[in-house]
Image (spheres, rainbow, N blue to C red):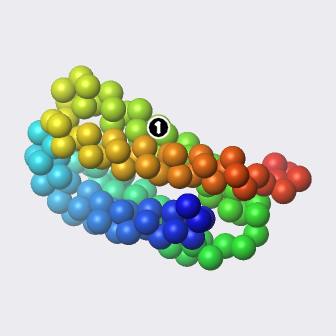
Amino acid sequence: MAFRTLLVIKAVVCLFFGPVLLFVPGLLFNLLGASLGAGGTFTARIYGAAVFGTMVLTWLARNAAEARARHAILLDLFVYDGIGFVVTLLSVVSGVLNPLGWGIAVVYLFFTLGSGYLLLTHPAVAGAAA
């Protein structure tokens, strides 16, 4: 998978979930078999803002040519999506989310594997940590 392709797909997924989490988080969580109180709604909306920000980053960075910038973006997505996969997996297995939660886990796994693959096959140039 190419860097640009991964980022465009990520931006499209974020374009769907960001606004839903920002404006109607209860709808999504009801579909997933979970309920939100006031604190959960606040947290879901803050997460929606982060997802919306990720959409902006991935869309604008899709044509990034500089290797260190690509590496930093991929590492961020790898960590973010890897943690999202583990948290979602645990939520489904423990019964917090209904079986529809598996779909979200698969999406997180897809992006974790995609960014991990690109990190392994396109290493950063020397001095990238500087």
The correct choice, above or below, for 59 with respect to 80 in the image is: below
Seen at 44% across and 62% down, the residue is 10
Seen at 29% across and 66% down, the residue is 16
**Which one is nearer the viewer's eye here, 3 or 57?**
3
Farthest residue, direction right: 126
Describe the element under mark 1 as helix, strand or loop: helix
Residue 66 position in % (x across, y down): 76, 69
The N terminus is located in which quarter? Answer: bottom right
- Would you say residue 53 is visible in this rendering? no
Number of marks in picture: 1
Query: Is residue 77 left or right of 19 when viewed as pictured?
Result: right
**Which one is nearer the viewer's eye here, 28 or 1?**
1
**Residue wearing tag 1:** 83
Picture quarter containing residue 95? top left
Residue 107 position in % (x across, y down): 36, 50
Farthest residue, direction top: 94
Residue 103 position in % (x across, y down): 27, 46
* Amino acid type assigned to the residue bearing label 1 in the image: Ile
Residue 33 position in % (x across, y down): 12, 39
Seen at 40% across and 39% down, the residue is 85
Query: Is residue 130 left or right of 35 when viewed as pictured?
Result: right
Query: Is residue 77 left or right of 119 when viewed as pictured?
Result: left
Label 1 packing within 10 angstroms: few (<14), some (14-19), many (20+) = some
Picture quarter containing residue 89? top left
Seen at 53% across and 52% down, the residue is 114
The correct choice, above or below, for 82 with respect to 77 in the image is: above
Query: Is residue 101 left or right of 3 when viewed as pictured?
Result: left
The correct choice, above or below, for 54 with respect to 93 in the image is: below
